[in-house]
Image (tube, rainbow, N blue to C red):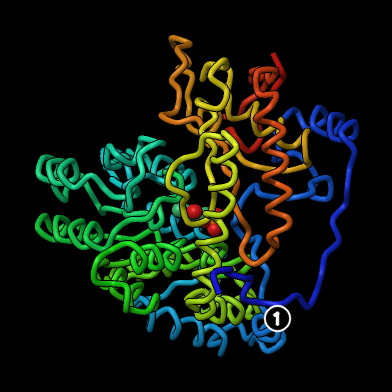
Amino acid sequence: MKIIIEPFKIKSVEPLRFTSREEREAILKQAGYNLFNIQAEDVLIDLLTDSGTSAMSAHQWGGMIEGDEAYAGSKSFSRLEQTVRDLTGFRHIIPTHQGRAAEKILFNLVGGEGRIVPNNTHFDTTRANVEMSGAEALDLPIADGLDPTLIADFKGNMDLEALDSLLEKEGPERIPLVMLTVTNNANAGQPVSMANIRQTAEICRAHDIPFFLDACRFAENAYFIKLREPGYANKTAREIAQEMFSYADGCTMSGKKDGLVNMGGFLAVNDDQLAGRARNILIVTEGFPTYGGLAGHDLEAFARGLDEVLAEDYLKYRIRSVAYLGEHIAALGAPIFQPPGGHAIYIDAKAFLPHIPPHEYPGQALACELYLVGGIRSCEIGSVMFGKTDSQSAQFKPAPLEMVRLAIPRRVYTKSHIDYVVECIESVVRKRDEIKGMRITYEPPVLRHFTAQFEIL
Ligand SMILES: *Cc1c(COP(=O)(O)O)cnc(C)c1O
């Protein structure tokens, strides 16, 4: 059989609410043309994010009932700790309510004025946490990774030469750790090769600098390695993931991605001293070290999710179903970031709407149009998220890429939902020349994409 079907059947359903185009026009205007401000029930297909939007399995829901709510020494924490330890090999597992809480603790401890944190590409909360500590968040992606049209296997890789010369120049005094994000979310969800992980680790070790993974999508990355990297075809996704973690000194993780849960995260480290200091902050800001910011039932579901996500039939379906969306809309003439990544399809809004310059936010304009046409919620990842306007010179500095991300929640939508998305994009392709640019009318000082307001030019 060639067809790859959803490796699950549906036990519990959630109805969708249909709206008319007129209703959506009013809703969007009311929301200040920011899709984060729209009520979820006014969205038909919600591709805003794959974060915390997964459908849990019956086994996970069963675990919710069995979750041990003890304040100290919860059985569910022990299960999560054991699961993470078997997977990662790290000594200290520090639970947090989500990924950014782990980042906040880590960069509180190792960041600060004058320090630099390199990463293949920082995710937005990672960057914000590094910068809030006073340190500089430096992206070192490979040049090929920034070309949306190039087809290559591992476009999420770190630029090893640039990393080596940076570490040579600055040393451990200024660089508290190096991070590698797998898969590279902010760079179109592109995978990182095992060779790149290993070599990044070797460079770090040569300079006596700790190496951390931002492991949010470790399972999807492991499956790309299995499919694409010589020598891994006959290894299991679990073995590949274990090897990935074996090169690192620690990681941050958002369970809301490859943990297959709606809430959860952790910080894991080998360094005893760092772990002790992290737990001290944890107790003040998240909770006791055997629950972090989580309920016992969250810990239980998270432990189970971390096992389920490594099932090969799941990963095969996951990677293939994302590629299916990408291939179909690319065939219709929607330029996408090639090749399709692990959790999302990124439409290249600059190429899709060449008549809208970056300072008029082509990505935002396209995201709004997708909502108007079909009630589809997507996410701009371009100059709204990463562009800056210098307050002194009023100079606009665009993001390197203008993308619209169609993130696919795990185990939530079926093939016909995705076919509907394809049909909507087909109609946007036909009238793309009529789409207009946008102007920001309000923006907050940090992470402006969440709350900015816009108007149509
Ligand atoms: C989602 C994400 C985070 C932050 O995790 P949250 O659980 O949303 O706080 C960090 N890094 C990457 C790569 C992510 O995708």
> Residue at 68% of width from left, 68% of height from top?
55
Helix, strand or loop for disc 1: helix
In this view of the protein, which residue sits in the foreground, 388 or 365? 365
Q: Position of residue 59 (x, y in %)?
A: 65, 85
Label 1 sits on what residue type?
A: Trp
Q: Is residue 243 left or right of residue 337?
A: left
User: Which part of the image, by quadrant, shows the C terminus?
Assistant: top right
Location of the N terminus (image quadrant): bottom right
21 is higher (above) or lower (below) than 181: above
Which of 74 and 35 lies nearest the eye of the viewer? 35
Q: Where residue 205 sits in the image (x, y, percent)?
A: 14, 61
Visible residue check, residue 443: yes
Observer-nearest of 228 and 451? 228
Q: Would you name the residue on which mark 1 appears?
A: 61
Estimate the x, y position of residue 164 in percent, counting from the top left.
Answer: 14, 46
The residue at the point 33 percent across, 41 percent down is 145
The answer to whether residue 90 is visible is no
Residue 206 as seen in the image, left or right of residue 318: left
- Extreme front residue here? 1
Residue 231 point in image, percent of width and height:
24, 71
Vertical placement of residue 25 versus 37, above or below: above
Residue displayed at 21% across by 61% down: 195
